[in-house]
Structure formats: structure tokens, C-alpha cells
């Protein structure tokens, strides 16, 4: 197997240890800007040796990504990022090494996509109320495949001068208490983790540092995730600060979870980490990829 790490001269002109395994990324199948094959080619160019494509609620890009991964000689892990509702919040669960053909998961994801469309219609009504008409059609211009997401609405809002970038949109719009927010019931946590496990995959709690919840609720989330059969957590994530790497390495130890690492890359215009540029997992962590025979 190829080395998980390599030394890189990038930007600082100092040797830096870089993670070459990236288990969280998005293509145009959901809200990324590269097609699955462009994304794999980009990852290969960044020196990534093992990657997971984890589109939101859709596994439709995996076959194209698999073919591209063969061409570029990198290992592709079949992935998906499932939106779940937990105590009135939306939580993301990444499934790694899933079988996209597993019928209950395929049907469940299809139901989530249908729900997304209903939510999008409601979001557009809410935005109209604050004087922003036409957002559903606007968002659709950015949605290339079956998924319509808040990111597509965010791109429309940026393009029309309502916010300076996508990150700013998620401060001033589309989130709880702000214009355009619509509460929505996704899959249940037990249900989504069940689909992942029964299809042969491992359920990973995605970017726990991003949910903006207090310590007590965070512990409740980890406890429920673990009880539902979740086996890993993203410790190093493009959404986490270095302090959060340490914090979630400790959570992983406490809840006996494996650790994952992923950029959550969406394309060059997003404020996420670039692929192949994340630091290694803290030493105390047990890497989730050992379960896939990768060292
Ligand atoms: Zn996510
Ligand atoms: Zn993601």
C-alpha cells in the first residue's frame, strides 16, 4: 500500500507532514464544483492516494469516480454523507465503504432527495418574504444533478450581491433564526446508521465541531451516535481548528471511536481545506482506514 503521509514543500518552504488520505469530498452530484472524474483527477494531482467521495444523500457519482480512480491509480472508498435529524438539529453522518446498491439505503436516500426539493421550495418562499424573489430557479442553475441544497441557494445569493461569499451566507441566511431558514425532518440517526452498517459500511460522525452546540449536548450526540452503531468520528476535518483536532481526538478516545480525516472539499471557490493538505491525525487516534486494510 502507498504511504499515508508524504513530505511536501507546499507554500511554507518547510517540510510539512501531510495527510494523503482524504475521506470526505463532494462532486457536482451534490454541491461540489467538480464532476466526480474531475474531482478524482484533482485529488490525484494533490498527491492524495486514498479518497472517499461522500456526496450529500446521493451515491450517483461513485461509478464515475471509480473509473477515474483506476485511471489515476488512487484508491476510492465508496462514500455518502447522509443528513439526519437529531433532537431538532441537522447532523451529518458519513458512510464509508458502503454498498450503494443496498436497496434500503438506495430507497432511503431517494426519500431524502425528495424531501430536499420540498425544503427548497419552502426556502424560496421564505426568501421571497424578505424581498429576494426567484431563488428556487436561481439555485437550480447551480444544481447540476439530482440534489438541491442550501449551498446552491448560497451561490445564488452571492451572485446576486446579498452576501460576499458562501461562508457569509451561512451567517446571515438559511440558518436558524435567519431569513430563508426552513426546519426539515431528515432521516433518523438510527435509520441512517442502520443503512450504512447493513450495506457493509462504517458510520462516521461528520465534523462535530461545526454543529454549534454546547458541551452537554455534544456528549449526548456522541453517546447517541455510539449507541446507534456509529464507529468513527472526523477528528481532522477542513471544518475544524487545530484545537478541535485535539478536542475530538479526546472524544474519540473517550467513546472508543475510530478517527477519520477529510477535507470536506467542495471546489476551488469554497472556504474549505484543499485536498491533500490536512495535517495527520493526532498520535493517540486509531485511524478508521485500518479497517480498509490501509496503513
Ligand atoms: Zn457535512
Ligand atoms: Zn460534506
Image (cartoon, helix red, strand yellow):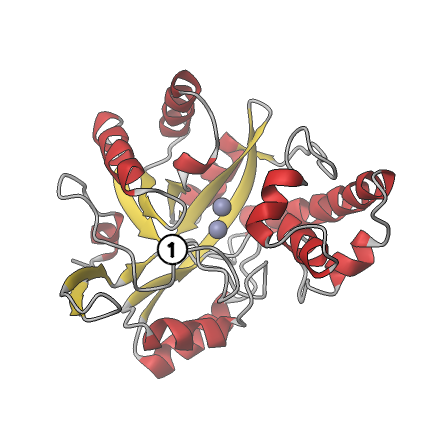
Residues 280 and 146: in front is: 280
Give above or below for 85 relative to 137: above
Total numbered labels placed on residues in the image: 1
The answer to whether residue 77 is visible is no
Quarter holding residue 251 = top left
The answer to whether residue 71 is visible is yes
How packed mark 1 is, by other alpha carbons closer than 10 Å (few <14, some 14-19, many 20 or more), is: many
Give coordinates of residue 148: x percent, y percent: 68, 54
Classify the position of the C terminus by image quarter. Answer: bottom left
Residues 258 and 133: in front is: 133
Rendered residue at 66%/58% (across/down): 155
Give above or below for 131 relative to 274: above
Residues 233 and 157: in front is: 157
Classify the position of the N terminus by image quarter. Answer: bottom left
Ligand 2 is within 8 Å of the C-beta of the residue at disc 1 = no
Give coordinates of residue 214: x percent, y percent: 43, 21
| 239 on left or right of 188 | left
Give above or below for 276 relative to 130: below
Give coordinates of residue 284: x percent, y percent: 14, 39
Disc 1: which residue: 263
Element on which disc 1 rests: loop
| 56 on left or right of 237 | right
Amino acid at each position: 500500500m502507498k504511504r499515508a503521509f508524504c513530505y511536501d514543500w507546499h507554500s511554507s518552504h518547510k517540510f510539512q507532514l501531510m495527510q494523503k488520505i482524504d475521506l470526505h469530498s463532494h462532486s457536482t452530484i451534490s454541491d461540489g464544483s467538480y464532476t466526480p472524474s474531475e474531482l478524482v483527477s484533482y485529488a490525484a494531482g494533490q498527491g492524495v492516494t486514498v479518497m472517499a467521495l461522500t456526496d450529500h444523500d446521493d451515491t450517483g457519482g461513485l461509478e464515475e469516480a471509480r473509473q477515474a480512480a483506476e485511471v489515476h491509480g488512487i484508491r476510492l472508498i465508496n462514500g455518502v454523507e447522509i443528513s439526519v435529524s437529531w433532537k431538532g438539529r441537522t447532523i451529518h453522518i458519513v458512510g464509508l465503504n458502503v454498498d450503494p446498491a443496498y436497496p434500503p439505503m438506495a430507497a432511503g436516500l431517494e426519500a431524502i432527495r425528495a424531501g430536499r426539493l420540498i425544503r427548497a421550495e419552502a426556502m424560496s418562499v421564505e426568501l421571497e418574504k424578505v424581498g429576494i424573489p426567484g431563488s428556487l430557479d436561481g439555485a437550480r442553475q447551480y444544481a447540476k444533478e439530482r440534489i438541491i441544497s442550501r449551498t446552491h441557494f448560497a451561490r445564488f445569493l452571492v451572485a446576486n450581491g446579498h452576501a460576499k461569499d458562501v461562508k457569509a451566507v451561512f451567517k446571515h441566511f438559511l440558518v436558524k433564526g435567519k431569513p430563508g431558514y426552513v426546519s426539515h425532518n431528515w432521516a433518523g440517526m438510527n435509520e441512517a446508521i442502520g443503512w450504512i452498517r447493513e450495506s457493509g459500511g462504517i458510520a462516521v460522525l461528520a465534523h462535530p465541531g461545526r454543529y454549534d452546540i454546547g458541551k452537554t449536548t455534544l456528549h449526548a450526540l456522541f453517546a447517541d451516535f455510539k449507541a446507534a452503531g456509529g464507529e468513527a468520528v472526523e477528528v481532522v476535518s477542513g471544518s475544524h481548528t487545530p484545537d478541535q483536532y485535539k478536542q475530538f481526538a479526546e472524544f474519540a478516545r473517550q467513546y472508543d471511536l475510530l478517527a477519520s480525516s477529510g477535507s470536506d472539499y467542495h471546489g476551488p471557490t469554497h472556504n474549505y481545506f484543499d485536498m491533500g493538505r490536512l495535517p495527520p491525525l493526532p498520535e493517540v487516534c486509531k485511524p478508521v482506514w485500518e479497517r480498509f486494510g490501509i496503513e
